[in-house]
Image (cartoon, rainbow, N blue to C red):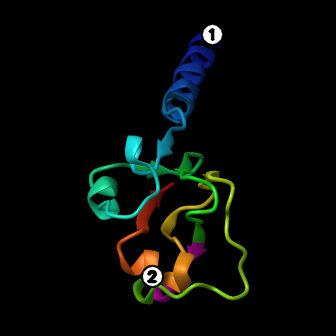
Amino acid sequence: MALVQFISAIVLAFVTLPSLARATTTHFVGDHYGWALNFDYAAWAKGRHFYVGDKLVFKYPRGYHNVYKVSGPEFNYCKVPQATEALTSGYDVIKLTSPGRKWYICGKAHGKHCQMGQKLFIFVKP
């Protein structure tokens, strides 16, 4: 009986430890450069791993930029969504709550900042 309990405990440890071992990560978008014009966010995101539970932090001077979470087509065309409010604090924290593709743009100047490259695409893993 003790052997069965011991084996059960080992199996439980192997099942639960991987989820406990991975701590959530806070990603400062653009690192020290922040959320700004003239930065390659595709290159910044390349090779990074984003997981459910992680956080994105968009840092920028308040009033100069904003952050919209958008759909793929809105991202591709730098279309500012009408039904969504922008994040505008200058220190916007977004918790990644679901896996899949995520798109973010700056909507200042009616999407011109996005057209100048201020846009981020990431893939969030479970």
Q: Give the range drawn in magenta.
A: 69-74
Q: Distance between the residues labelled 1 and 2?
A: 68 Å
Q: Is residue 119 left or right of 15 when viewed as pictured?
A: left
Magenta run includes residue 92: no
* Residue 107 drawn at (x, y percent): 55, 76
- The amino acid sitting under disc 2 is Lys
Q: Choose between 23 and 80: the one closer to the eye.
A: 80
Q: Which of marks 1 and 2 is in front?
A: 2
Residue at the spot 41% in from the left edge and 68% down from the top edge: 118
* Residue 39 drawn at (x, y percent): 32, 60
- The residue that disc 2 covers is 112
Q: Is residue 113 left or right of 42 when viewed as pictured?
A: right
Determine the image quadrant of residue 81: bottom right
As helix, strand or loop, the secondary structure at mark 2 comes to helix
Residue at the spot 39% in from the left edge and 81% down from the top edge: 115
Residue at the spot 45% in from the left edge and 82% down from the top edge: 112
